[in-house]
Image (spheres, rainbow, N blue to C red):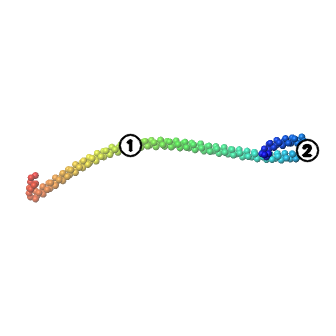
């Protein structure tokens, strides 16, 4: 315990020394001086060791402070970059939203045009079908008439009025 608390020990030794001074013995005094000088040297070494430790701790503190400042600068830069990225992404999002709205309008217009064109196509197809059926009917009528005329002409050519004479 005395090694840990050299000041307490020194106080106690001071008191002992004062008591010894009053009853001084030169042989004892010389021995006591040697002990005190040895203690002084040990205390001086201890003091040097503690000063070195303090210097080391200060250096660590300074190094830690510098590292903390570097980390803080990096974090500030990263935060600024992140904020810039967020702004850019928000602008891109807005642009994409507007583009989506524009495309939606174009799609709606295209669908309306498609519906209109489909209606016109169906109407044209119905007209084509009507005209085709009318044309087919006329062609059938013309063919039937030609067939009747051929039969009549054949009948007349074969010589007789037969049934064709009635017509």
- Residue 153 placement: quadrant: bottom left
Please indicate whether residue 17 sits to the left or right of residue 121 in the image.
Answer: right
Please indicate whether residue 19 sits to the left or right of residue 124 in the image.
Answer: right
Crowding near the residue tagged with mark 2, few <14, some 14–19, many ≥20 C-alpha atoms within 10 Å = few
Q: Alpha-carbon distance for marks 2 and 1?
A: 119 Å
Q: Which residue is mark 2?
A: 25
Report the residue that reaches farthest toward the right.
Answer: 26
Report the residue that reaches farthest toward the bottom.
Answer: 158
Q: How many marks?
A: 2
Please indicate whether residue 35 sits to the left or right of residue 66 in the image.
Answer: right
Q: The residue tagged with tag 2: helix, strand or loop?
A: loop
Precedes in sequence: disc 2 or disc 1: 2
From the viewer's side, name the closer residue of 6 and 158: 6
Q: Which residue is mark 1?
A: 108
Percent of width and height locating residue 155: 11, 57
The correct choice, above or below, for 50 with respect to 155 in the image is above
Crowding near the residue tagged with mark 1, few <14, some 14–19, many ≥20 C-alpha atoms within 10 Å = few
Q: Answer whether residue 51 is visible to the viewer in this image.
A: yes
What label sits on residue 124 in the rendered view? none
From the viewer's side, name the closer residue of 156 and 119: 119
Percent of width and height locating residue 122: 30, 46
Q: The residue tagged with tag 1: helix, strand or loop?
A: helix
Percent of width and height locating residue 72: 62, 43
The correct choice, above or below, for 28 with respect to 158 in the image is above
Q: Residue at x 21, y 50 (%)?
A: 137
Q: Residue at x 83, y 42 (%)?
A: 12
Percent of width and height locating residue 151: 14, 56
User: Which mark is nearer the camera, 2 or 1?
Assistant: 2
Q: Residue at x 9, y 58 (%)?
A: 159
Q: Answer whether residue 44 is visible to the viewer in this image.
A: no
């Amino acid at each position: 315990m005395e090694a840990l608390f050299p000041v307490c020990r020194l106080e106690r030794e001071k008191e002992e020394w004062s008591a010894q001074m009053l009853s001084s013995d030169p042989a004892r005094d010389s021995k006591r001086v040697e002990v005190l000088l040895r203690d002084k040297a040990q205390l001086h070494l201890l003091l040097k060791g503690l000063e070195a430790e303090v210097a080391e701790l200060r250096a660590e503190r300074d190094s830690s402070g510098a590292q903390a400042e570097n980390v803080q600068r990096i974090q500030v830069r990263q935060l600024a970059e992140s904020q810039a990225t967020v702004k850019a992404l928000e602008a891109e999002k807005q642009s994409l939203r507007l583009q989506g709205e524009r495309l939606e309008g174009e799609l709606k217009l295209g669908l309306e045009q498609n519906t209109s064109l489909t209606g016109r196509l169906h109407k044209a197809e119905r007209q084509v079908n009507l005209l085709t059926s009318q044309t087919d009917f006329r062609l059938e009528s013309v063919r039937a008439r030609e067939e009747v005329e051929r039969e009549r002409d054949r009948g007349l050519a074969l010589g007789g009025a037969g049934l064709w004479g009635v017509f």
